[in-house]
Amino acid sequence: MTTAFLLTVLYGMGQAGASYPVQVAPFTDAAPAKEVVRLSGDAGTAVPGTFGKGTAPRSAVRLDGLRLNPSEGLIHFWVKPLWNGNDGKRHRLLMTERAGGRQLVVEKAANGLLRAELTTPTGMTVARADVSQWRANEWHQVVVGWVSHNGRPVGLPLWVDRWAKDGPVTPHGVWDAAEMPSALFLGDETSEAVFDELIIRPDLKAEGPYGMVACVYRDYFRTTPYSAVQIDLEPTRVPSDRRAVAGCEKQFGLLGRLGSRWEPMVENVVRYSQWAYFDAKPLIRWSTDNSAIATVDGNGRLKALKPGTCTLTAEFRGMRAKYRLQVLPQEMPDLGAICIELHPRYRNDAMKNRIARGEEATARVRLGNFGPAEVPAGTVVRLSLIPDSLRNYRLDP
């Protein structure tokens, strides 16, 4: 697999799908675009979904009115299987109508692989992902896409829970523009699963220049089964004072509760994690209840104006998180850790923080000080490094 092909799969280099609508199922509650077209057909048995109501088909649910862009696009849906991924059985999840001898089928095979099979008159292309670790009654995002370069189909990427698991070259092409499928079938007698948030995108540039990866991430945040949100006080992943300093800025983020864990919904460390360009920031609404104390922009960047307290609020998909913020005067020193390094650095960079019990190590700590207060010569500042459950360290000045 060449670097050029990987870039094509991730960022999508096909023609724009402006003449094709974004389509959703009758049970899709998210709004992936300002204007969407709903597929027609029986939505099946209504059950709780990831976001609103989903469907639990006992036989194949036919959805008519399908219009796919033959050059590029994706099919996005959530599935909650009632089986384990290693159950040794085949489960059909999705299938397009056969047209021009071409058909896309997504199913979990008996060997625990999720397979996206694209059949054509001249051969088959298969994208695979190991889902043997799936457990019953847990939701998973599945996305199948197709991309082209200079009018030629080049790949069939398969995503699971925001991860691009496979992206084989399509030597037999993808769709025949002269004869396209007009219907999609969700589930069948073997599926034994709940489905929700079916989205069909014709334009991989819809979420910006980062193509398919941006569409996959943004649709993930639009439809993930979060049960609650809370404000992230350390969104840059370094220890940070929970207060703000008058005249200075402070970055906040948002966490979503997915099952028993909290996961970040925004990313600010662009140098190390490029998904900051297509995270959930555009979907979050920030505000403060006292603009004289502090203001906040659409990215969660707060500007502290004068000492006092105010409430910071973040709204996301009908859920709301609040944080009571204290703003300190500049005259009050406020130490913040920038980074902590242990020396000597090990050859394996991933092991540099894992010192053994009883081992001596030298730590270099970089601190930032908001306050201009003078410290008399000879003053001793005591700093403690306290290991946490992940064997990292937090600063306790």
Image (cartoon, rainbow, N blue to C red):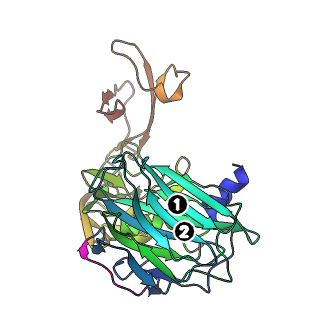
Residue 366: x %, y % from top left: 46, 35
Front one among 139 and 18: 139
Position of the C terminus by quadrant = top left
Q: Quadrant for residue 46, please give it.
A: bottom left
Assign the magenta stretch its main secondary structure.
loop
Q: Is residue 299 visible?
A: no
Q: Describe the element under mark 2 as helix, strand or loop.
A: strand
Residue type of the residue flagged with mark 1? Ala
Residue at x-position 37% and y-position 52%: 89
10 Å crowding of disc 2: few (<14), some (14-19), many (20+): many
- Residue 141 is situated, as x and y percent measured from the top left of the image, at 41, 61
Kind of residue at disc 2:
Leu
- Residue 106 spot, x, y in % from top left: 48, 63
In the rendered structure, which segment of residues is drawn in magenta? Answer: 40-48
Q: Which residue is mark 2?
A: 104
In the image, is residue 295 part of the stretch drawn in magenta?
Answer: no
Q: Nearer the viewer, residue 245 or 168?
A: 168
Locate residue 249 relative to residue 317 in the image: left or right: right
Left or right relative to 344: residue 211: right
Q: Is residue 380 above or below residue 43?
A: above
Pointer 2 or 1: first along the chain: 2
Q: Nearer the viewer, residue 395 or 352?
A: 352
Judged from the image, the secondary structure of the residue bearing numbered disc 1 is: strand
Q: Where 266 sits versus 88, above or below? A: below
Dots 2, 1 in contact, CB < 8 A: yes
- Residue ID for mark 1: 116
